[in-house]
Image (tube, helix red, strand yellow):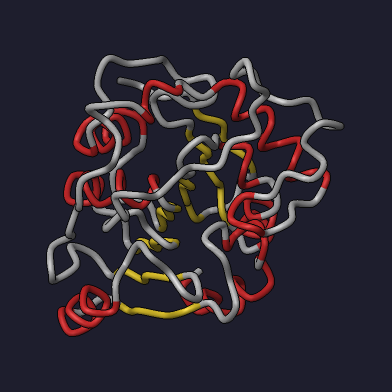
Amino acid sequence: MRLHSVSVGDGPKTAALVHGMTGDGGTWFEVAPWLVGLGYTVTLVDLRGHGLSPRASSYRASDLGDDLVDTLPTGMDLIAGHSLGGRALVSAVESLRPRKTIYLDPAWTVPRDLVISRPLREDGSVMSLGEASGWAPAGWPLSAAHLRSSLRSQALFDATMLTDPWWPLPDLVPCEKPVVPSLVALADPTDLVPPALADRLGAGGYEIRVVPGAGHDLHVTHLDALKITIDDWV
């Protein structure tokens, strides 16, 4: 499946950003300009069932990865994936062969009882901006701009992805040796990459770093700390 994508910037280096569950390419509205300022042309994709990309009858990690392969060119300078996007990227990296990858708190080992917080009314519709003013995923407050972005993406999200057989997500363990140089930037703490897995991947060649104090949406709630953590990789 070819995904909806938008490119910004015109730098000589190329990067792609892959969002997490219930998001879309718009979630990167603060990250993309930063990379553009570093000389990148940045491609923002909407995963299947998200944003303006098509709905689907299957939401396996391999499907999400195949879509990235259908959409992005091979040999990009950098691809970063957050949460579900990091899960999709693991399935695509061998084909896409970017020069580097960055996984942002990737959804590799998801607790079976994890509940995805969504700003919904009792009838299942997405709240208005005023109604959602006190809503905060995982307890982290959102700025007004990020709340507007989240409400837009939530309204476009295919909620069947949160039903059987697609949810809960089964464990997806990456190859112990990275296909390309790979940085894993983790929330502090994280439930998605347990210490034993992080240690094993680190021993295999992944660069494992923790973003101090960050929650799961670290590119939203702790962007300055994330920039410091990954600066030498971008």
The one nearer the camera, 148 or 167, is 167
Residue 48, x across and y down, in percent: 39, 25
Instruction: From the viewer's perspective, tell me whether residue 230 is left or right of residue 163.
Output: right
Vertical relation: 183 (above or below) 78: below
Residue 138, x across and y down, in percent: 58, 55
Vertical relation: 196 (above or below) 65: below
Instruction: From the viewer's perspective, tell me whether residue 60 is left or right of residue 76.
Output: left
Image-quadrant location for residue 218: bottom right
Numbered marks: total: 0
**Which residue corresponds to the image point at 67% horizontal and 59% vertical from the top-left?**
140
**Which residue corresponds to the image point at 38% horizontal and 21% vertical from the top-left?**
160
Residue with the most extreme right position: 130
Which of the image's four quarters has the N terminus?
top left
**Which residue corresponds to the image point at 61% horizontal and 72% vertical from the top-left?**
227
Image-quadrant location for residue 220: bottom right
Residue 166, x across and y down, in percent: 27, 30
The one nearer the camera, 43 or 1, is 1
Instruction: From the viewer's perspective, tell me whether residue 148 is left or right of residue 214.
Output: right
